[in-house]
Structure formats: C-alpha cells, structure tokens
Image (cartoon, grey):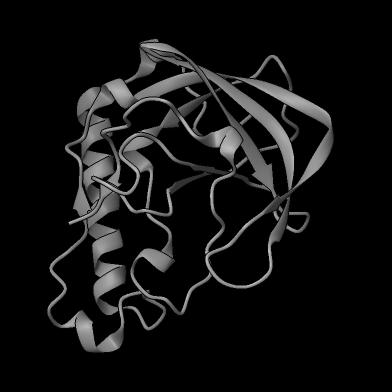
Amino acid sequence: MTDTEAAEDEFDPEAWREQLESHREEKDEFFAEHPQSPIPPEDREGFSGLEYFDPDPDYRVVASVEVHENPGPVEMDVTAGAPQRYLRVATLHFKLGEEYELAAYSREDHEGLFVPFRDKTTGQQTDEHGRYMEFEVEGELADTDEMVVDFNLAYSPFCAYSETFACPLPPEENWLDTEILAGERTR
C-alpha cells in the first residue's frame, strides 16, 4: 500500500488545498535558501518562487496498481551522461477523461516509485524534459491496491534550473496524449 492511498469519500478539498499550498511554500523556501538548491547561488537572491498551475482536484485521481512480478529493466536516457537503469515495477491505470496508464519505476537501491512523464504541455507550459512524480510505498504492492496519483504534485527535474544536473528523460511509454494542467509549470 502507498502512503497516499485514500478512499475518495474521505477526500477533504480544503485540507488538500492547504496541504498543497504548504508543500509549495516549503519547496520555494528550499529553492531560495538551501545550499543544495538547483537555483545557481548567484540567482537565488532574485528568486521569487516557482510557477505552478492553480490547484485542481480534478487532477487528483485514483489509480489501480498492476504489479510486475518480474520487473523488467529500463534504460532511461538522461540530459547528460550515460543512461540510468531502472526497474519497471508497476503500471498505474487511471481515468482522466479517458483511460491512461503510466509505468512506475524503481532503482534497485530505492523503495519508492518514480513516475517520470511527458504530456501535451511538455516544452510549452512545462519543462522540455518532462516532469516527475514520486510515491513512497509501505510494504509490498499488490494488484488489488489503489493509490492516489495527484498531478498537482508533479514537478520539474533539477536540470530545468541548472545544467549541472543530469536528469532522466521520461521513456516513450510514459508520454501522455493529453494536457496535464497541474503541478509545476515554466515561467
């Protein structure tokens, strides 16, 4: 099960919005002040925060989890350097107007799920490299699991802010043929 699992009848839109806004404020503070911020030090003083689409609960969907018992390796190209190896551990099936799916990956040394994706906003309203989502997993995933996929938490990779970072590029299987007007966007 995931820490984001929740029944839809328990969803509180006001609490969700407050939590999302708090998360965004913390991230802006990290980018402005933290030594490991991807914003170059000389640009931090003028940094006024990241750009986001307005919070939209319609982009918070419940996905059914299809677990891959024998996860296949995937070599993801990166913005600089050698490809990185991930394991395709699950497929998330969800409805956003139409039915869609996204592959969820894991590194051998990491327990969470990594979901890089592109959509019709990529390179226009959002970063040209695509965006990412990450999910923590508690215990073993099973095909009967459902999890909340909140695209309002989608974020741009660090390479969007500095060329010193090498970022995995979403594989073609995670290119969505729709606009995801949620999460981080470009200025």
Q: Is residue 164 left or right of residue 82?
A: left
Q: Quadrant of the N terminus?
A: top right
Nearest the viewer among 74 and 54 is 74
Residue 29: x, y in percent? 25, 68
Vertically, is 95 above or below 2?
above
User: Based on the displayed image, in which of its 4 quarters is residue 80 positioned?
Assistant: bottom right
User: Based on the displayed image, in which of its 4 quarters is residue 18 positioned?
Assistant: top left
**Residue at the extreme right of the image, as rendered:** 70
**Residue at the extreme bottom of the image, as rendered:** 42
Q: Residue at x 52, y 63 (%)?
A: 167
- Looking at the image, how many numbered discs can be counted on the residues? 0
Vertically, is 75 above or below 62?
below
Nearest the viewer among 177 and 98 is 177
Nearest the viewer among 187 and 154 is 187
Residue 124: x, y in percent? 26, 46
Q: Residue at x 37, y 83 (%)?
A: 35
Q: Residue at x 58, y 62 (%)?
A: 78
Vertically, is 41 above or below 149?
below
Residue 129: x, y in percent? 43, 54
Q: Residue at x 23, y 54 (%)?
A: 186
Q: Is residue 24 left or right of residue 60?
A: left
Q: Quadrant of the C terminus?
A: bottom left
Residue 30: x, y in percent? 31, 69
